[in-house]
Image (cartoon, rainbow, N blue to C red):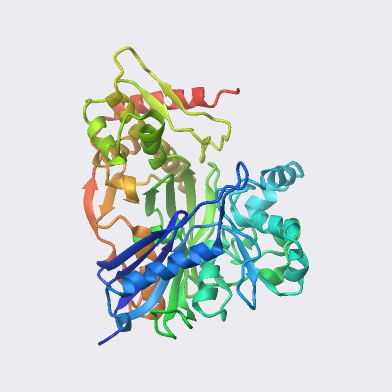
Amino acid sequence: MSADLLLAIDQGTTGTTVLVMDTEGRTLARHTEEFAQHYPQPGWVEHEPDEIWKSVQTSVARVVEQVDAKRLAAIGITNQRETTLLWDRKTGAPVHRAIVWQDRRTASECERLRAEGAEDQVRARTGLVLDPYFSGTKLAWMLKNVDGARKRAQDGSLAFGTVDTFLIHRLSGGRSHVTDVTNASRTLLMDLAKCAWDPEMLAMLDVPKGVLPEIVSSAAHIATTSGFAGLPDGLPIAGIAGDQQAALFGQACFAVGDTKCTYGTGAFALTNVGPTPKPSQKGLLATAAWRVKDDTVYALEGSAFIAGAAVQWLRDGLGIIERSSDVEALARSVSSSDGVVFVPALSGLGAPHWDPHARGLFSGITRGTTRGHIARAALEGIAFQVADLLRAMSDDLGRPLARMRVDGGAAANDLLMQFQSDVANVTIERPRELESTARGAAMLAGVGVGLFPNIEAASRMSKPERTFHPSLPDAERQAHLGRWQHAVRLATLPR
């Protein structure tokens, strides 16, 4: 029997999902294992690396029970980005809990560097902004605050990595210390144009080069398994990408201007800009999308901090729905939001506004406002944020975006998707399976191991199921956008 299946490890913020897919994109086995979040101080978020690893072991074991492991051709890995780990090279033992991408402990250090005028250099070299979101300042914090870490890093006995690097180190029995260009591009330490560690950024953050992994392609024979229970030794690890880049690849966004948005807790939109990094003039991030062989593709990225989290807030904070899945029916109980607008700035506003002090706001409420209007306005607020991101991307590209592919749990909401199409004036394609991150990892692994001769052939794993077309008259669209822009101005007033 030939090896014709792909195992995708999707290591996320609250749990690990492992899937086995065939080359047509069908999921044959699936398991998710959650793990704990740790909050040692306000603004600090940590994971136990061994709990992450155990969730991977358990999930792999459960799916291998459902398929013949001999049919596995390769492993693809996609991961929560920016989460930072540091471990002993010989023993693999972590020296500290993983510092999660959400963690804000290095905010003061970012502010110090910004005050010293480093922001322009950071953006020019890395495509990013100075923010505790990214890995570099997290690593610098560990080297400074963990006893003996700096000395051990300098003498070569410690290894740094994002989650992909940590998993590959353990899957390979400690033989491989690598990361791909997509994850490296989120560290504040990589020269985006050269796809190489940047000496000036290493000096700025006081990070010794010897602690860093080798940067490799996103699809190649990267490493092989060794000593992992349930998997044969020598199974190629052939695909790696950070979760949002994996979703872009998994949605087959292979041409310049191809765009996807993932609707999860937040909403993350990326658009393919081709083989050259494109600095944003509209508050977006420049990032690596993937590298296959020697060809690197870049993307612009914008994020809205609150998407599905707004629905969770309606459920847990306001108590107007019992289950998140109830929101669409409640929103459909009214024919429109009746002028009610919700700005979901519950954690500030992300791109293109970048206002951490913005606060959530409802406007247009009257005596006739009902739970249905609030629910509908909440869904529309998600769509308005994404429309802002798409407008910024269109301006940076210098051309309109005609189509967007969507994934993530909230993309299952038909009302949200239709309104998104209407206010952004784009056609929306939704795939048969919404787990595009795992599919992207599988597709990259299939390319890396040669199951697909090229990325175009891999696109057969990605099949749109439903299309939403804009149907709103332009005057009505502009009226909606005008109300939204007015509400954003109110949400961002100085306090």
Q: From the viewer's perspective, is residue 396 above or below residue 34? A: above
Classify residue 145 by image quadrant: bottom right
Which residue sits at x=44%, y=85%? Answer: 234
| Residue placed most toward the observer, 238 or 483 | 238
Residue 253 visible from this viewpoint? no
Q: Report x, y in % for residue 343.
A: 44, 29
Quadrant hosting residue 266: top left
In the rendered view, tell whether residue 95 sits above or below residue 257: below
The answer to which of 150 and 257 lies nearer the viewer is 150
Residue 257 is left or right of residue 51, and the answer is left
Where's the N terminus, which quadrant?
Answer: bottom left
Q: Position of residue 254 (x, y in %)?
A: 38, 62
Question: x, y percentage for residue 485?
Answer: 44, 27
Q: Answer above or below: position of 316 versus 431.
A: above
Looking at this view, is 355 or 20 the one in front? 20
State the image quarter where residue 322 is shown. top left
Q: Residue furthest top?
A: 367
Position of residue 163 in the picture relative to residue 201 (left or right) = left
Q: Residue at x 42, y 48 (%)?
A: 269
Question: Which quadrant: the C terminus?
Answer: top right
Q: Is residue 438 visible?
A: yes
Q: Residue at x 49, y 52 (%)?
A: 300
